[in-house]
Image: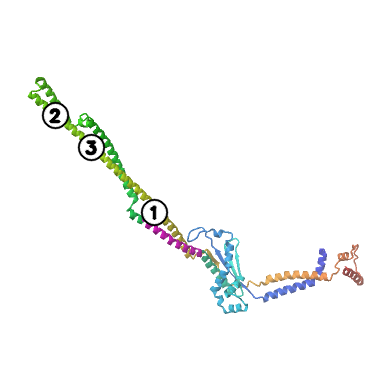
Amino acid sequence: MNLLQLLLILKARYKVILITFLITVTTATVVTLFLPKNYTATTSLLLNYKGMDPVTGMVLPAQLMPGYMATQNDIIQSRNIALKVVSQLGLDKSEQAQMQFNQSNGSGDIKNWLANLLLNNLVVRPSKESSVIEISFKSADPNFATVIANSFAENYQQTSIQLKVAPAQQAAGYFGQQIKTLRDDLEKAQSRLSAYQQEKGITNPEQNLDIENMRMNELSAQLSMVQVAAIDSQSRSSNAQRSALDSPDIVSSPTIQGLKSDSARADAKLAELGQRLGKNHPAYRSAEGEALKIRSQLNEEAQRLSNSIGNSASINQQRESQLRAQVEIQKKKVLNLNRLRDEMGVMQKDVEVAKKAMDAVTQRYSQTSIEGQSNQSDIAILNPAIPPTSPSSPKLFINIVLGAFVGLVLGLGFGFLAELLDRRVRGRDDISIILGVPVFAVIEGNTSKTNQNLLLGQARKLLTSN
């Protein structure tokens, strides 16, 4: 079938097409006029992303996630928010709602039934290029549609806050219990440390250790000095005992020097008298006795000085032993203080660890407590819903356009169907197709009606037989 045949068919069946088109458009118009009018109220919400939590100051990247807007869409259309809307507006207490629920043979709870009805008429449209979400509700009453749309927006705000606050409140409760446990551990650690200090009599271990170290250093220095003095005095004592009159300590004594001078004079006088007098002479004997007396005094004085040097060496040795014993005692005391300091340091470390753990948990508890009490939301109502002045459906113009399109399609369909049921010759191409022979010539001019009818009758018979 070519275009010419198609146009000939449309021309021949224009009445069927036109009637079908007019009936369809008229039906769509009448149905549109008699359909109940519905009004749609829309509330616009702005998800105000600031990038930082107003309480904790932490960066919140959740709004940048690809599924964030879709998640908010699902939350708005959740049964939880629909039930809150029903409870907030008291729809379940309405006599009309209860009567409709009973007439619909509804099973279960009337609140769930009403929530399903609200969700069926609710439309949520998130913006693709911004953080704005539109909540639309359709109803026959414009005021009711406005109230429902605004109620969904308000309950969505509150639910968003609750979803953010509830985990913080649970965390605050957990941290509160942990604080009690950590406080008990800190008190036990501090009690052990205090009891240990009282038992050992420690007030300031670092200061005590410094004092004892200074005392030990002083004793060590004194011991070193006494050891040097003991070695020196021992050497002088040994030298004095071997040869008293040759010892430098004895020789340097003024008394010894004086006695030596007197002994030398007495010996010189005795030698002089021995040259002049005999040994039995009374003067000689007197001088000899005086010389012996002076020599005896010299020996006695040398022996006394030697004993004094020996006593000094003995005293130095005794002081050395005493200081050595004191150094050993002081060393034990310092070592004991070091051990006590180490043991006390372990206990102090336990106290510090317990205190740090408690401080960290206390900080987290304060933060989560503030978060749990926060009523701030990053969702703001941009444009609250207002009662619509014109119905959103049915739309007369759109329905007429759709009716015209459907009527045109149906008209064409019915026209082609009528042509198939009652096939006719519309032109010379049809005759060529029916007879199966080419058309050699077309005779133009006035032909008799009888010849024309004859040709059409033969063509119809051939078409019917085929």
In the rendered image, residue 184 lying in the magenta stretch gets the answer yes
Task: Residue type at mark 2: give it.
Answer: Ile
The image quadrant where one finds the N terminus is: bottom right
Q: Is residue 383 left or right of residue 291?
A: right
Q: Main secondary structure of the magenta part?
A: helix
Q: What is the quadrant of residue 249 in the picture?
A: top left
In the picture, the quarter occupied by the C terminus is bottom right
**Nearest the eye: 348 or 430:** 348
Q: Secondary structure at mark 1?
A: helix
Q: Are marks 1 and 2 in contact (CB under 8 Å)?
A: no
Image: magenta residue range? 165-193
Counting from the top left corner in percent of width and height, residue 396 is at 67, 72
Q: Which residue is mark 1?
A: 347
Residue matched to label 2: 294
State which quadrant residue 309 falls in. top left
Who is closer to the viewer here, 372 or 85? 372
Percent x, y of residue 276: 9, 20
Instruction: Tell me the distance, in whole angstroms, between the alpha carbons under discs 1 and 2.
Output: 78 Å
Q: Amino acid at mark 1?
A: Met
Tell me which numbered mark, 1 or 2, is placed earlier along the sequence: 2
Magenta segment includes 240: no
Which residue is at 67% across, 76% downward?
34
Which residue is the site of mark 3?
A: 312
**Amino acid type, label 3:** Ser
Q: Which element is circle 3 on? A: helix
Q: Which mark is in front, 1 or 2?
A: 2
| Nearest-to-viewer mark from 1 and 3 | 3
Task: Give the crowd class for mark 3: few <14, some 14-19, many >=20 residues within 10 Å.
Answer: some
Q: Position of residue 388 (x, y in %)?
A: 59, 72
Label 2 sits on a secondary structure element that is helix
**Labels 1 and 3: the sequence-earlier one:** 3
Sort mark 2 into few (<14), some (14-19) or many (20+) by Cα contacts within 10 Å.
Answer: many
